[in-house]
């Protein structure tokens, strides 16, 4: 009887004593290191965001007030004249359409090809697998201008200079190596048992890939596509060299056109920069959850 009483008392005491985790916390102790860290992060945030703020501010200034002194950190008379003249005096709408077409097509096709190549590299053993991966990594270290001469000559022989399909093919070739290495990590993090179970149930290898593995890897695929899209959307060097007419120019080369020998149209250039930044910002904002999941999914192999 005494043993039962002692056991009941112990259990009652265990239930009534609050755990340390649920105990109310006192005020957090302020340390010098914490203050320095917060101040440093705040300064870094201001330094990072101030150029974006200044571009947006300049875009809303009237053309005659862009270079006024003293400097205005907030426009006294906000104006949309730069945005209106951007579309009235230039073909900026055409440039936006060209960039959207090229970036979306190249990003989607490069992601699909990289998905297949990453699957092969992750699931199969073959001779030359190591050198292929090393070659993919080495391509990221080679500046684009080194291959510009042979690339331009080849595109000229194929009749693809100053054509959107030609620029799309070049961007696809540039995006595939990085996307393949990126998606390979995601495939290696997915258990082989999922694919084997689907094949036992009657799926082919491609069926198991697209019906079972692709839904599991959706965050990684979205992350790879967004990185490909942003790279194609922001690329300047190849678009300037390969595109010669306004009907085929993309947004980065159009921004370069606002710089002349004796003058820079800061107002129109800032308005164009704001419109160029918005699509990538919206894409990252809408898909941030999948991007974070995709970047962390292939980080650790279980």
Image (spheres, grey):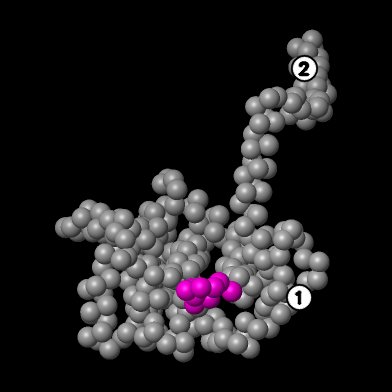
Q: Is residue 15 left or right of residue 171?
A: right
Callout in the foreground (2, 1): 1
Q: Is residue 197 magenta?
A: no
- In front here: 177 or 112? 177
The dominant secondary structure in magenta is: loop
Instruction: Name the residue rendered at 52%, 82% in the picture.
Output: 95
SS for tag 2?
A: helix
Please give the range of residues in magenta. Answer: 255-265
Mark 2–mark 1 Cα distance, whole angstroms, equals: 75 Å
Q: Which class describes the residues within 10 Å of circle 1: few (<14), some (14-19), or many (20+)?
A: some
- Outermost left residue: 127
- In front here: 271 or 224? 271
Instruction: Name the residue rendered at 67%, 79% in the picture.
Output: 83
Residue 215: percent from the left, percent from the top? 49, 66
Q: Assign the N terminus to one quadrant of the image.
A: top right
Instruction: Name the residue rendered at 22%, 73% in the picture.
Output: 150
Residue 163 visible from this viewpoint: yes
Residue 105: percent from the left, percent from the top? 44, 79
Residue 116 visible from this viewpoint: no
Q: Which class describes the residues within 10 Å of circle 2: few (<14), some (14-19), or many (20+)?
A: few
* Disc on res. 79: 1
Label 2 or label 1, whichever comes before in sequence order = 2
Q: Quadrant of residue 92?
A: bottom right
* Disc on res. 10: 2
SS for tag 1?
A: loop
Above or below for 112 versus 140: below
Q: Assign the C terminus to one quadrant of the image.
A: top left
Instruction: Name the residue rendered at 68%, 25% in the picture.
Output: 32
Q: Quadrant of residue 36?
A: top right
Residue 225: percent from the left, percent from the top? 47, 68
């Amino acid at each position: 009887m005494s043993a039962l009483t002692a056991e009941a008392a112990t259990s009652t005491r265990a239930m009534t004593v609050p755990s340390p985790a649920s105990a109310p916390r006192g005020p957090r102790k302020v340390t010098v290191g914490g203050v320095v860290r917060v101040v440093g992060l705040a300064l870094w945030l201001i330094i990072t965001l101030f150029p974006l703020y200044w571009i947006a501010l300049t875009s809303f200034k009237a053309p005659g007030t862009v270079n006024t002194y003293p400097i205005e950190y907030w426009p006294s008379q906000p104006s949309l004249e730069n945005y209106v003249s951007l579309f009235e005096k230039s073909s900026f709408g055409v440039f936006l359409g060209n960039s959207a077409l090229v970036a979306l097509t190249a990003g989607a096709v490069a992601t699909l090809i990289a998905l297949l190549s990453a699957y092969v590299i992750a699931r199969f053993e073959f001779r030359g697998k190591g050198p292929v991966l090393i070659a993919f990594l080495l391509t990221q270290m080679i500046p684009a201008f080194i291959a510009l001469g042979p690339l331009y000559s080849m595109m000229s022989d194929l009749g693809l200079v100053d054509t959107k399909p030609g620029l799309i093919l070049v961007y696809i070739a540039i995006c595939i190596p990085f996307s393949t290495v990126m998606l390979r990590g995601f495939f290696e993090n997915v258990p082989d048992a999922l694919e084997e179970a689907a094949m036992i149930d009657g799926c082919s290898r491609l069926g198991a890939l697209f019906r079972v593995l692709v839904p599991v890897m959706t965050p990684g695929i979205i992350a790879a596509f967004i990185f490909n899209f942003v790279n194609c959307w922001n690329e300047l060097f190849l678009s300037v060299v390969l595109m010669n007419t306004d009907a085929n120019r993309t947004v980065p080369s159009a921004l370069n056109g606002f710089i002349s020998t004796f003058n820079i149209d800061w107002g129109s250039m800032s308005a164009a920069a704001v419109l160029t930044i918005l699509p990538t910002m919206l894409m990252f904002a809408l898909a941030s959850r999948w991007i974070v999941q995709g970047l962390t999914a292939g980080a650790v192999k279980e």
